[in-house]
Image (cartoon, grey):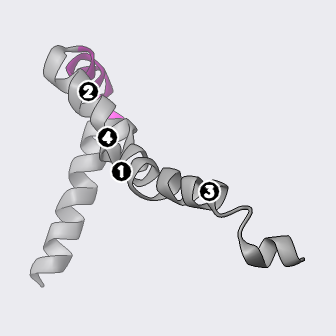
């Protein structure tokens, strides 16, 4: 019952903000704190950059370094 109330409240709040108070939201996002928060949300909390630096780049480096290993030379 509590979960249903939370979902309905969230939908009502979102509808009120985006349909009736859109100018207020635009003004809030244009200010300092709102702009930084929007940027953080827009860039996925930095997870893409973190994923790239922690997993993708080391994997690409390993692939580049191991490109000429014995198995690949035998093929």
- At x 56%, y 53%, the residue is 61
Residue 25 magenta:
yes
Which residue is at the front of the view, 59 or 12? 59
List x then y, in percent, for residue 3: 16, 78
- The boundaries of the magenta stretch are 19-30
Callout 3: 10 Å neighbours few (<14), some, many (20+)? Answer: few
* Residue 64 is inside the magenta segment: no
Residue 72 in percent (x, y) is at 80, 72
Q: Earlier in the sequence, mark 4 or mark 1?
A: 4
* Kind of element beneath mark 2: helix
Residue that appears at 40% across and 43% down: 49
Image quadrant in which the C terminus is located: bottom right
Cα distance between the residues tagged 2 and 4 = 15 Å
**Circle 1 residue:** 47
- Residue located beneath label 3 in the image: 65
Q: Which residue is mark 4?
A: 41
Q: Depth-wise, is mark 3 or mark 4 nearer the camera?
A: 3
């Amino acid at each position: 019952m509590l979960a249903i109330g939370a979902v309905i409240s969230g939908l009502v709040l979102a509808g009120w903000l985006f349909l009736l108070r859109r100018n207020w939201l635009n003004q809030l996002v244009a200010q300092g704190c709102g702009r930084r928060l929007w940027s953080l949300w827009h860039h996925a909390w930095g997870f893409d950059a973190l994923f790239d630096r922690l997993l993708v780049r080391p994997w690409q480096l390993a692939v580049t370094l191991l490109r000429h290993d014995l198995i690949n030379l035998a093929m």
